[in-house]
Image (cartoon, rainbow, N blue to C red):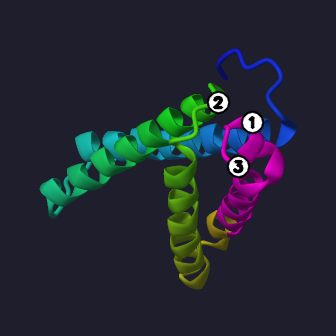
Amino acid sequence: MPDSPGLPATLRWAVGILLAEAAGIGAVAVILAFEDVTATASNARAAISITVYAAIMAAVLVLLGVNLARRRSWPRGPAIALQLLALLLAFNMIGNGVAWIGVPLVAAAIATTILLVTPATREALGIH
């Protein structure tokens, strides 16, 4: 995380969770890229598109996390929106038998959203 002296705990935790999510999605992108290269996909274009999408999402989460750590206010809204979208994905995962990923994702999305709307975080970002 970038040097961020005096960052409130709520914002530090939110940034940490965003960066952890980025690392997880980045790992998925690497695995998907390996699969794209080594497997024979029935639809290579779709497989590559999903891999690129995962890599872009990881990069976006890093971008948001780093800028929040720098006390910029603009990433707060997009970060909250992505967490709410992650909830939809997580509930879909839980319903489709991948609860071991879905449940932690629900917890991370809810925690990050709450952390980003706390008064301490808003004050640190200059949002009143």
Q: Position of residue 119 (x, y in %)?
A: 81, 51
Image vertical order of residue 18 relative to residue 40, above or below: above
Asked which secondary structure carries label 1, the reply is helix
The residue range painted magenta reads 103-128
The disc at residue 124 is 1
Tag 1: amino acid = Ala
Quadrant of residue 91 within the rendered picture: bottom right
Q: What amino acid is at disc 2?
A: Arg
Q: Comparing marks 3 and 2, which lies closer to the viewer? A: 3
Across and down, in percent, residue 72 comes to 58, 32
Q: Residue at x 34, y 39 (%)?
A: 34
Q: Which residue is mark 2?
A: 71
Q: Which mark is residue 128?
A: 3
The image position of residue 65, as x and y in percent, is: 59, 36
Q: Position of residue 24 (x, y in %)?
A: 57, 44
Which of the two labelled residues, at mark 1 and mark 2, occupies the earlier sequence position? 2
User: Circle 2: is it few (<14), some (14-19), or many (20+) Cα within 10 Å?
Assistant: many
Taking the magenta stretch, the answer to whether it contains residue 75 is: no
